[in-house]
Image (spheres, grey):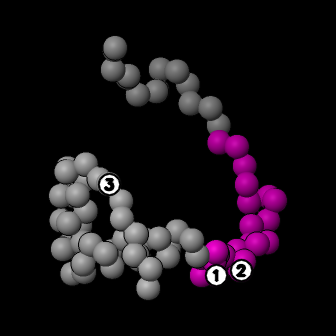
Amino acid sequence: MTEISIQLDENILRALESTAAKNNTSVSEWIKDRIYRELKQEWPENYFSLFGVLDENDLHEPPEIPFEHETKREAL
């Protein structure tokens, strides 16, 4: 296999090491897995079976909520 090197800030390296440890893997394996997942050109399982599941009549625009029923927003 080919080796590559990257430069990371110390805080990113610590977070990466911690995440890899939580996943019971090495930093190298964790990064390799993420790269493979990112480059993999697959659709999620059962993705295409969802086409045509909803009828046009299943979709509708909900009624507008009157202003007095809206949640109060934080003043900035």
User: Which numbered disc, 2 or 3, marks the residue that appears first in the sequence?
Assistant: 3
Q: Mark 1 points at which residue?
A: 46
Give the number of the mark in front: 2 or 3.
3
User: Disc 2, disc 3: CB below 8 Å?
Assistant: no
Residue 11 falls left or right of residue 68: left
Q: Which amino acid does label 2 sit on?
A: Ser
Give the total number of marks visible in the rendering.
3
Question: Which quadrant would the C terminus be assigned to in this image?
Answer: top left
- Per the rendered image, the range of residues in magenta is 41-62
Q: Where is residue 16 in the image (x, y as percent from the top left)?
A: 25, 62
Please tell me how crowded label 3 is: few (under 14), some (14-19), or many (20+) other residues with Cα within 10 Å.
few
Query: In terms of secondary structure, where does tag 1 sit?
Result: loop
Q: Residue at coordinates 19% horizontally, 73% vertically from top-left?
A: 22
The residue tagged 3 is 7
Q: Quarter-wise, where is residue 39 in the image?
A: bottom right
The residue under label 2 is 49
In the image, is residue 31 part of the stretch drawn in magenta?
A: no
Q: Are marks 1 and 2 in contact (CB under 8 Å)?
A: yes
